Image (spheres, coloured by chain):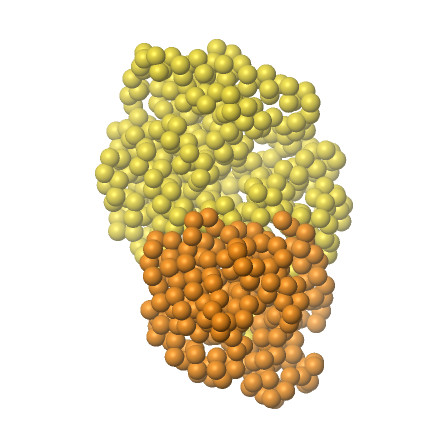
Amino acid sequence: MSRTVRVAWLYPTDMSTYGDAGNVRAVVRRFAELGLSVVVDRCDPGTELRDDVDLLVGGGGQDSGQGKVHEDLLGRGPLLTELALDGVPMLMVCGLFQLFGHRTVTAAGEDLPGIGLLDVHTRAEPGRLVGTVRARSDRFGLLVGYENHSGRTVLGPAATPLARVEHGGGNNGHDGTEGAVVHHVVGTYLHGPVLPLNPALTDALVRQAVRRRYGNVPDRPDGPPAPGAPDPAVPGVSPWVERARAAALVRR
Amino acid sequence: MTTDHPPAFCEPSPTSGSAHRRADRAAALVASVLGKGVRWGTRLLGGSGSTLPGLVVERLVPRAVPGLLAQLPRGVVLVTGTNGKTTTTMLLTALLRDQGLRVATNPTGSNFVRGVASALVDQADLTGRLRADVAVLELDEAHAARFVALVRPRCVVLLNVVRDQLDRFAETDGVADLLAGVARRATEAVVLNVDDPHLRPLAGSLPEQRVTTFGAAPSWRSSLPVDPTCATATGPSLPSLPALPALPTPAAPSVLPARPAPTSRPTVAVERCAPDGRVTFAVPGGLVEARWRLAGAHNALNAAAALAATHAVLGSAPDPRTLAATLAAARPAFGRGERFVVDGEPVEIVLVKNPCGFQAALGAHGGPGGATLVAVNDAYADSKDTSWLWDVDFSGLRDQAVHVSGSRADDVALRLAYDDVPVSCAVNDVPDAVRAFVDRNRHVPKRVFCTYTAMLEVRSALGATRRVEAAQPAAVHPVDGARLVEGVGR
């Protein structure tokens, strides 16, 4: 009997500007490698967000995209907070990282309250932080990605940085922090997309989801391959991950 | 405001005898002599000479470009937008030439201001005079805004706004604002795509310019294959995750639900674009029907843009049969589906630079079977951020021999692996990869999808190392000293 997990993709229409769909592909593939079946719910404004969701992924968008999802997100704030307290892993990149904080002030001066799940504040400033980022995390090793944001995010005392910047701007270009973590919720500015390039982070999110739902995580699939499992005739993604990371690591 | 019969462009612009104009003329003269000297020098030293003269001229003589263009009796047509600039510029140039106009243009896709300067210097004579009636110039979105501050075009053609090189342009909303500003600098006419949600609102908001529109005819809209990332007003993002059968079928549209229907019929409409190359356009003078060599629905829209601009420039409706003859004779532009004969076998080269363009190219050139090389560099001109590859669906390449190359070959391979596309060869060095690709894939159709700087390397490699045959001598493109040939036909 195949185990199943449910992934919610937050705002795929308005908040997936920078290839963040790759993060959904990454978690789905990792679940499948561990022998789990995956259902992905696309959560655009007005659609249902199920309370039995196992993992949430959300991305970045333009200011106009943030404007479109903002009110809908505020309405879901209590449920998202409850899920986070219950240990549901979440990855929020760029724009949704900002809206998962207390508030964000856009380049146009609009003051958007967030859901306050992450203890961070964001304010847009002139000059975008654009380019390759390398950031060191105690838990996930060296993270690589590509940032592109005008928002400067500052962490409050209840948020832990995801990583320390070794190259690039990170949260604000000043304090050396990249991203923020609380419970199993990860916010980050890393595109690339971040999960295919950083399998340690992918694995941690996926394992937390499985552990929470089923109590243990299989080392390898037992029984027949789950629907959607990688084709065994294809070498798979792992041979390319290190090479792609190596290419990103030497970029300025 | 939309009119179907703009009376534009018939009158030559009045020439001014002011000191201002004389200074511009002097600058144009100096620039022509200097630029030609630099170009000859560059060629003697083995360079291609595509933008260096323009760079020199742009630095030394800031007024050279306005000076050269001020001479043109019918002014300047500026073509811009995310995708299709080079092809539309080429088609519009051909259409106007076949209507009897002398046209200056920048035909190599070198679409920064200095590329324009370079092309104009090359086409000017040693007295600093452009022997042309009109200039058709493509400029990238950022350089279009710079250009219109120097020179006000008589006509601006806006093709589309889709997610492109975000490390340079940031967000599509910003690009749309930029293009609106460019349109407002047009002295007479604006041609725009009413199927583009970013551009359509402009049709009603340009008080001073005559607006001519192009787009899909209602009967063709439903069959227009569209990458979903192109379809929404904010740009991107309905990747269909095809490699993952466990997913519920998302609302990934195969048609155009995200685009609200335009309120009125466009001035020029694509009526049909069949796989056998037959295309039909409704124009103010009737129907333009042709069988042509350009592949894909996106190129039909480019042709609609060129036809609409022709109408705007001429100010009258030319005989549809002469327009059709021009389209029938057209060949793919520089790196936009050009076909080269290498060791007796055709190789197609297709420039890709953003998710929409790549998806359209895979649809038009992918086809089942055959061999594919994907070459992605991350220089400034390519986009330093390769995230966009993740918004392209590559599953159509599963049954092909796929090679990858370029400075980000491994990112491409990783992306392909996620779509269960096996990669048979990954070589960073593009010339080496091209040699291996041609050698290992004999007697099958071959296509190369490449980013801009990778395309230059691919062309150079094919010309430098391979016996390239002239299938149709009329279509010889000189490239870096080699003679590459496109236009093998369908």
Left or right: B87, with B199 as reference point: right
Residue B30 visible somewhere in the drawing: yes
Q: Say above or below: A124 vs B199.
A: below
Residue B112 is situated, as x and y percent measured from the top left of the image, at 49, 34
Residue A150 is situated, as x and y percent measured from the top left of the image, at 45, 54
Task: Identify the residue at horizontal 27%, vertical 35% (top origin).
Answer: B209
Q: In the depicted view, which residue is nearer to us: B366 or B408?
A: B408
- Asked which quadrant contains residue B489, the reply is top right
Left or right: B18, with A14 as reference point: left
- Asked which quadrant contains residue A13, the reply is bottom left
According to the rendering, which colour does chain B have? Answer: yellow
Q: In the depicted view, which residue is nearer to us: A48 or A83?
A: A83
Task: Identify the residue at horizontal 40%, vertical 42% (top origin).
Answer: B159
Q: Say above or below: A84 vs B438.
A: below
The N terminus of chain A - image quarter:
bottom right
Residue A202 is situated, as x and y percent measured from the top left of the image, at 61, 71
Q: In the depicted view, which residue is nearer to us: A34 or B149?
A: B149
Q: Which chain is orange?
A: A
- Asked which quadrant contains residue B349, the reply is top right
